[in-house]
Every structure is written in C-alpha cells, then in structure tokens.
C-alpha cells in the first residue's frame, strides 16, 4: 500500500478518545475533528486493556465506511504485554491507520507492516532511542507521518520544559527534517495539556505550523476548532498551492521550476495538503 493515499496524511487535528468510553466515539467523530484516535494506551488502565479492545470491537460495525477512514487506533507500546493483542485487533478490523507509541526502530515498524499490509502507520516519537533512530523510522514501510510525544519525551530525557517547550525545539526540527527527507507527510505535533488555556493552545498550534508540522494532537473536543483554525492555510498559501498543482499537471509529473523554486513530489504533496485543508478540490 501507499500510505500517502490515506486521507489522514492531510489531517490537521487528531482527537484522542479513551477506548473504554464507547459513548464518546460518535461524539468525537461529530466534533469536527479530522481524525479520532481510539486510545488503548495512556488513557486505559492495565486491568482495562481487554475491556477497551472489546469496546472498539463491538462499536466497529456501527461506523460508516467514511467514519472508519477517520478512525485511528493507538496501540500500546511495542514490547509491552498488550501490544500483540492490539495488533490482532487491528488485523481483525482491517484498520486504516495505527498510531504506535514509543516507536524506536525500523524493525518494529516493518514488522507491523508485514502483519497489517493495508494499514498506514504513524510512529510516535517519545524516547531518546526513537529520536536517535528517527530517519530509519521515517523511512520504514507504510509510514504515513511521524507524531511527537512531547510529554513522554521530556520525561525520558529528564528535561523540564518552560511553557513554550523551548527545550524541545531541536527535537521538533528533527521530526520535520526527517519527514521531508523521507518524503512523507509533515509530522503531527504533541499535545497541549491545558484544556482551558486558549492562548497557550493557539500559540502552540501556530508554532507547530511555522516549524513545518502539518497537524497537532488534541486531548479535548474544545481544542479541535482552535487547532483547525491555526492550521488553516492563508490566501497566499492557497494561491501558491494552486499554482504548484497547475505547474505539476502541465509538466506531467516531471520536476519543474516555479518562481525559481524546484517543484518535485514532496512539494506537490504539500500543495495537495494545503488545498485539502482549505477545502479546495
């Protein structure tokens, strides 16, 4: 499969929902979120893991075909006692997209691709090992885009961040750079833990966009519209993207210059994402 065919590559916001709360699944899908992440990891206590998997299994037939395209499942971390059962569930559901926390190696990602050949993979970078192996992970089979686990990464590195998470700027840059080199969709920034601090969330989302991220993880429905607005393309960005697509079509997919800049496949993908976010055909 080509992960870039997955529409979630263009999503600007991913809303987490505990898998133990099936009553919230439909509400999350109706919240305006581009993607809904059914969370089997941090939001679920160890003794409730099987209950959470069963809740997803029972709810799955009630989702429409289009809704299933917007549903992501966050498994437990590779090597945990719960990981194998999560992959079995993903296989059962023919899941469109799997978010893998604490992703740390090429072998981990390629192993998932062998088991789930029809599933796009979003590796979550949350550890020093994952950050060190970033380029290998980004180039693994079926990787759609990377995601930053900013809180877990701070804990793993022993970093105490200021409110702007200045100490993680270099890590964020590395995710953007690795994504560009691997020619995958722009990465997804981590969460803003404060639900009610509108200013902090808005500043975090605008920083992510400026740095080259294509989206942000959300932990509450009220965060979704603010993140969506922050990532909405400007009129200049829409104009640029429209001209890129036009130039690409005229060149029949060959590399071409536009305003002195080389237009190749990654730039075309960025233009497509910009137009998709803007709701342009």
Image (spheres, rainbow, N blue to C red):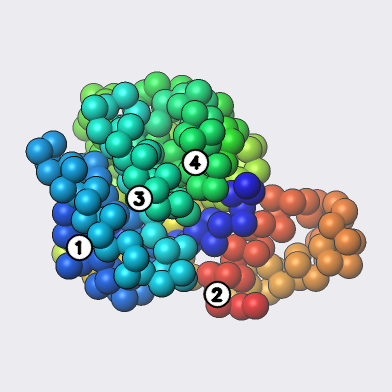
Residue 240: quadrant of the picture: bottom right
Numbered tag placed on residue 278 in the rendering: 2
Reading the chain from its start, which is encountered first: label 4 or label 1?
1
Q: Which residue is mark 1?
A: 22
Q: Nearer the viewer, residue 120 or 206?
A: 120
Looking at the image, tell me whether mark 3 or mark 4 is earlier in sequence order. Answer: 3
Q: Earlier in the sequence, mark 2 or mark 4?
A: 4
Q: Is residue 187 positioned above or below 58 on the image?
A: above
Residue at 37% over, 23% down: 128
Q: Which residue is mark 4?
A: 116
Q: Nearer the viewer, residue 258 or 43?
A: 43
On screen, residue 188 versus residue 201, left or right, reads: right
Mark earlier in primary sequence (2, 3) = 3
Name the residue carrying label 3.
73
- In the image, 50: left or right of 267? left
Tell me the CA gap for discs 3 and 1.
Answer: 13 Å
Q: Nearer the viewer, mark 2 or mark 4?
A: 4
- Please rate how many residues cluster around mark 1, counting C-alpha atoms within 10 Å: few if below 14, some from 14 to 19, many from 20: some
In the depicted structure, whether residue 214 falls above or below residue 126: below
Q: Secondary structure at mark 3?
A: strand
Identify the secondary structure beneath mark 1.
helix
Is 133 located above or below residue 245 in the figure?
Answer: above
Question: Can you tell which of label 2 and label 1 is closer to the viewer?
Answer: 1
């Amino acid at each position: 499969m080509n992960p870039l065919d997955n529409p979630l590559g263009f999503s600007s916001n991913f809303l987490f929902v505990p898998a133990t709360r099936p009553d919230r699944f439909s509400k999350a899908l109706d919240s305006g979120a581009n993607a809904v992440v059914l969370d089997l990891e941090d939001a679920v206590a160890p003794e409730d893991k099987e209950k959470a998997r069963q809740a997803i299994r029972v709810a799955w037939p009630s989702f429409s075909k289009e809704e299933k395209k917007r549903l992501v499942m966050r498994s437990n971390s590779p090597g945990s006692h719960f990981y194998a059962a999560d992959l079995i569930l993903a296989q059962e559901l023919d899941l469109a997209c799997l978010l893998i926390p604490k992703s740390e190696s090429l072998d981990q990602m390629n192993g998932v691709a062998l088991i789930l050949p029809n599933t796009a993979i979003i590796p979550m970078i949350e550890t020093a090992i994952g950050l060190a192996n970033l380029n290998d992970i980004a180039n693994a089979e079926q990787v759609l885009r990377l995601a930053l686990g900013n809180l877990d990464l701070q804990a793993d590195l022993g970093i105490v961040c200021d409110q702007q998470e200045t100490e993680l700027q270099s890590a964020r840059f590395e995710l953007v750079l690795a994504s560009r080199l691997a020619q995958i969709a722009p990465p997804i920034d981590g969460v803003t833990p404060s639900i009610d601090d509108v200013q902090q969330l808005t500043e975090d989302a605008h920083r992510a966009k400026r740095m080259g991220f294509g989206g942000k993880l959300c932990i509450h429905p009220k965060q979704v519209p603010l993140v969506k607005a922050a990532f909405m393309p400007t009129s200049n960005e829409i104009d640029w993207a429209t001209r890129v697509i036009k130039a690409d079509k005229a060149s029949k997919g060959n590399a071409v210059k536009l305003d002195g800049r080389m237009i190749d496949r990654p730039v075309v993908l960025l233009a497509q994402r910009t137009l998709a976010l803007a709701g342009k055909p």
